[in-house]
Image: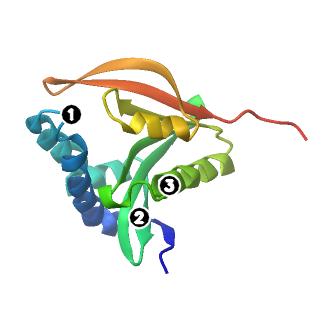
Amino acid sequence: MNETEIQAATSADVPTISTLAHAIWWPTYRDLLPHGQISLMLELMYSESALLDQLKNGQQFVFAVRNGTAVGFVGFQAKPAESIMRIEKLYVLPAEQGKGTGKQLINHVETLASAVGIHCLELNVYRHNPAKTFYERQGFKVVSEVDIPYHGYTLNDYIMQKCQTMTSL
């Protein structure tokens, strides 16, 4: 069977998240970002210690698992004061892209957000990342552009949101 399952990650899964990030980031960004920036961001965001800190600070992670192997993940965190669920990370192995895995991860986060009364997902995407088109197909819209100073680099991102309107019965 080739079905993808969604599984919650715990601190014990941090090595798997780190390994996936390294396997995904290089092919995704090698032609878009300086290699020094990729290495720095992997260390600052995806080292095991950085991931443990993120978990301690409230970020949750879930995996997409196919045939017993993690093939992608999403990291997210509720921002209740803003009524937003922030998708901080969403990555799928290159061989897994185009199979609906990313969409399944987004839908899972959307379901979790809705269950706690949050009806708006938000994420940042690098302005030159082809993934922007994928997010648009999932219903996200660009709400602003930001240039974020980051350890000697500048992250040129779009902020994208997907918000559900509340309907009364």
C-alpha separation, residue under disc 2 versus residue under disc 1: 29 Å
**Residue 147 picture location, percent across and down:** 30, 18
The image shows residue 55, relative to residue 122, as above or below, that is: below
**Residue 149 picture location, percent across and down:** 23, 21
The quarter of the displayed image where residue 33 is located: top left
Identify which amino acid the numbered label 1 is placed on: Leu
Identify which amino acid the numbered label 3 is placed on: Leu
Identify which amino acid the numbered label 2 is placed on: Ala
Closer to the camera: disc 3 or disc 2? Answer: 3
Q: Which residue is mark 1?
A: 32
**Marks 2 and 1 close (CB-CB < 8 Å):** no
Q: Which residue is mark 3?
A: 105
In the rendered image, the residue lying farthest to the left is 36
Q: Quadrant of the C terminus?
A: top right
**Marks 3 and 2 close (CB-CB < 8 Å):** no
In the rendered image, the residue lying farthest to the bottom is 1
Q: Looking at the image, is mark 2 or mark 1 earlier in the sequence?
A: 2
* Residue sitting nearer the eye, 140 or 41: 140
The image shows residue 144, relative to residue 13, as above or below, that is: above
Q: Which residue is mark 2?
A: 9
Mark 1 surroundings within 10 Å by alpha-carbon count, few (fewer than 14), some (14 through 19), many (20 or more): few
- Who's the residue at 12% across and 33% down the image? 34
Q: Looking at the image, is mark 3 or mark 2 earlier in the sequence?
A: 2
C-alpha separation, residue under disc 3 versus residue under disc 1: 24 Å
**Is label 1 in a helix, a strand or a loop?**
loop
Mark 2 surroundings within 10 Å by alpha-carbon count, few (fewer than 14), some (14 through 19), many (20 or more): some
- Who's the residue at 36% across and 68% down the image? 70
**Residue 137 picture location, percent across and down:** 54, 39
